[in-house]
Image: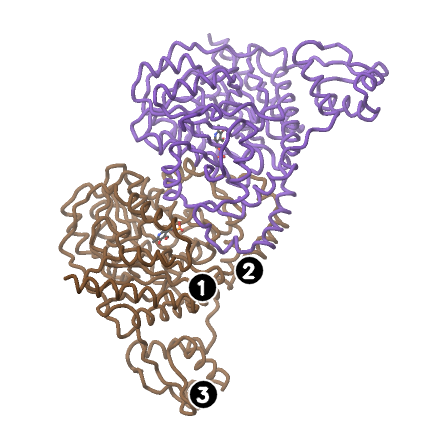
Chain colours: A purple, B brown
Amino acid sequence: MDSPPLYRKLATHYIDAIGAGSLKPGDRLPSLRSLMRMHDISLSTALQLCRAMESEGWVEARDRSGYFVKRPRRLAIAAMEEPATHVAPDPAQYVGIHAKVSDFVARRRQHEVRIDFSTARGSPELYPGEALRAIMMRLLRQKPALLTTAAPSRSLNPLREAAARRGLRVGMTLSPDEVLTTNGCIEALNLALRAVAQPGDTVAVESPTFYGLLQVLESLGMRALEIPTSPQTGLSIEALEMALDAYDNIKAVVTVPHLQNPLGSVMPDAHKERLVALCEQHDVALIEDDTYSELLDMDTPPRAIKSWDRTGNVIHCASLHKILAPGLRLGWISAGRWHSRVEMLKYTQTRSNEELSQWAAGEYMNTGAFDRHLRRLRDHLRQQREQAADAIAAHFPSGTRLNYPPGGLQLWVELPDHLPSMTVFDLALRENIFIAPGTLFSNSSRFDHYLRLNCGWPITETIEAGLRRLGEIASECAALQRKAA
Amino acid sequence: MDSPPLYRKLATHYIDAIGAGSLKPGDRLPSLRSLMRMHDISLSTALQLCRAMESEGWVEARDRSGYFVKRPRRLAIAAMEEPATHVAPDPAQYVGIHAKVSDFVARRRQHEVRIDFSTARGSPELYPGEALRAIMMRLLRQKPALLTTAAPSRSLNPLREAAARRGLRVGMTLSPDEVLTTNGCIEALNLALRAVAQPGDTVAVESPTFYGLLQVLESLGMRALEIPTSPQTGLSIEALEMALDAYDNIKAVVTVPHLQNPLGSVMPDAHKERLVALCEQHDVALIEDDTYSELLDMDTPPRAIKSWDRTGNVIHCASLHKILAPGLRLGWISAGRWHSRVEMLKYTQTRSNEELSQWAAGEYMNTGAFDRHLRRLRDHLRQQREQAADAIAAHFPSGTRLNYPPGGLQLWVELPDHLPSMTVFDLALRENIFIAPGTLFSNSSRFDHYLRLNCGWPITETIEAGLRRLGEIASECAALQRKAA
Ligand SMILES: Cc1ncc(COP(=O)(O)O)c(C=O)c1O
Ligand SMILES: Cc1ncc(COP(=O)(O)O)c(C=O)c1O
């Protein structure tokens, strides 16, 4: 893996210092001359460093006197509170989410999209389309039989190899045979759940969680037990422990340890270790959804939960859909002791994935370009999140809270005074602005006054205006609600 | 659609005459001169006609005296008997097929494949790899964003359009919106079954049927009720009627009307019409698996079952995997009144298929090249089936029966004296020759003395030798069994 350029490493160092508070808003960055001397770098590197920090909104240049740390507006917005962990709701067979999602989709369909904040998606130009295209063209020339030959069962290919190799970075020792390619993470989750649980069984999930998972559970006839989840540290291990003691038909836990959707929380390693032990002890399968790890603002993601797995009780699911190429449907699963059962279910559900895209993605992942792309992607997303968060701080009603995550595609916003985000959704829709209302992310009504905003698109003037308009709509609703009260 | 060249039409005419018996083995074809006069064709067309018939094994040239109808050896082999239709076995939750298939796969794994008669697959050179590759290269140049953009939900593309348009040829009037792309026919079957039935429900299937379907049912916790099926006309409508009267928890019927796997049977139109009415009357969903229609030896396949559907009770499933490109995993489903439910299940199971391969396949299907390819593919397969059947007639033990199908990739062979095909399988395996034993195609033991032979590969000397060796192995087993009796 290549390391980032020098100026980038230094920028990270100074950004960390800002994050840690040792450089405060208004402080002056060391002068170019001091930077050159302190870090033994050239003038051009020192300039690159300052310009990068400026373009990312960390510092601003003041005429002749140097670069000063900016006061990010988003710092003015309060963080969310921790959830109560002593209440785990009843497991109810969740048969409402499809209706909710269908209703949401149906309403959207009546309007043309002008600005879409509702999906969890990066904009196409953030992905290495050109490089992937070149690899695919070469593969088509060199291996035309990929189109006309059915994949031999169990064939290895560069994707499975790359997935296994990259697993090593996060503590997983897997051979390529233990990695099965799937149609995105969503198929991996389906297979994992079908392997470990039956219709009628209960599955513990984070609350809030991404509605795709609730839909999968509903379609499989399984019950979702929502476990309180911290905006900072993710799934509450205490609450899960209480739930495992209280209910005896919990067959699996599904968790997104890094950049949970929608919270953006990141589970500390100590929690991961406890979680693995707890699930083993209760003989409950642990399903790790690793869709977003590579979008964390760090060069190597933290250890995967599966890296603590000694008994094959953890099923690891991942995907390239959000990090490499949204036009490909590639994910994978390492199913531990359920490997054979998952392999069989995958065969009966969709057979092998097409080989061409697996080869193309795998070969790309085998080059240094992949890590360079990820670094660039994270940089863009960070800037976009920051600009979006600034706009929220500037335009949303006072009392709005925000969970500002250390990476990823989205922001999770809490409206003040329990303002229903469905109202904001409906009003915004009339102006062709789409958001994801919080009600989609839970079986309960706990998140009805939250909303999720996608930051996958560059913050153009249109997008900026859309955020402002959203803030105005929310403020108008808030004012009306206060008047009515 | 282009029509075939003139000589081909005339060849079909004479082959039909041989089939109908108006030209018998030993008869002389009209002389070149008579052919020219009778059909008003040039000498070169008349020669093309005779050479085509010769190379396909219908006639042989005798020095100076012209072309004579050959006695196909395969005519010496007896056809299979019709099944008794008054016995429908008990519906049993079928939990054995995975074990059988796994055992079969495990045994195969211990050996290197030398000759594989066990799959249902065409050889790569039978498919238009070059043309597909050219289209894909062009698409990558013209629409690179296909790689980096997630398919918008409900987006139309050339595949959905081509599938809808080709449906018209077989009597189905569908708009592209009613056609959902799937990962092969297998995903279509999964979605159809999940839409219309629940775990524990019973599904009526043909007996024998392809083991993939039995695996899907087992993995979904559904029960397979095997309905007697004619090697000629397919699913017995009488037997189904009796079963529908006898059992009240049958939720669906799955049928392969054209070139059923493994039988190769073709359901007459009158049966299709009765079947549609019967299922409607009993409020049972009818799932049509149309994987093989385009491999029938005719230019336009017969009407689809769905063409009789007036109430949305028929779900039509199809695939390009065997007819266009085994390296692509493209199929589709038109789910009638279950359309929304299937759309939702598809979304929760795998999301949309990748767009690039859909565009490539769809654009190819929109050209005349597709029908020309299909015609060539059918011609090759017919020759291969004929040569394989001749080899079986020559080398298999006397009393062997064969269902010689009017198209497709495979032959279904009945061994004499209830000789277990698993024994032949095991002995052949030791010589690295793979077959599919009949036991895989049913929950019962009724087909334990059958085997399925793939004819998707050109009959090279190696393959010919493999067929001879298989025949010898079967003959040795038969002799031993007779001696023991
Ligand atoms: C947490 C999480 N898991 C899984 C998925 C589905 O991923 P894929 O597109 O790879 O199927 C998503 C997509 O939104 C997600 O947010
Ligand atoms: C009758 C039948 N249906 C469906 C399938 C699966 O088709 P696909 O490869 O398109 O998923 C097969 C493959 O063997 C088959 O024979």
* Circle 2 chain: B
* Chain for disc number 1: B
Rendered image quadrant of residue B338: top left
Q: Is residue B247 visible in the rendered structure shown here?
A: yes
Contact (Cβ within 8 Å) of mark 1 with mark 2: no
Q: Which mark is residue B235?
A: none
Depicted A326 relative to depicted A65: above or below: below
Occupied quadrant, residue A215: top left
Spatial CA distance of label 3 from label 1 is 28 Å
Q: Which residue is mark 3?
A: B36
Residue A313 sits in quarter = top left
Between the residue at mark 1 and the residue at mark 2, the CA separation in whole angstroms equals 13 Å
Which amino acid, mark 1? Leu
Q: Position of residue A226 (x, y in %)?
A: 39, 19
Q: Nearer the viewer, residue B371 or A463?
A: B371
Mark 3 or mark 1, which has the lower sequence index?
A: 3
Residue bearing the label numbered 2 = B131
Label 3 secondary element: helix
Q: Earlier in the sequence, mark 1 or mark 2?
A: 2
Identify the element where label 2 is drawn. helix
Q: Chain of mark 3?
A: B
**Quick check: do tags 1 and 2 share a chain?**
yes
Foreground disc of the pair 2, 3: 2
For the point 32% across and 53% down, the residue is B306
Amino acid under disc 3: Met
Task: Identify the mark nearer the N-term, 2 or 3.
Answer: 3
Give amino acid for label 2. Ala
Of B76 and A446, nearer the camera is: B76
Mark 1 surroundings within 10 Å by alpha-carbon count, few (fewer than 14), some (14 through 19), many (20 or more): many
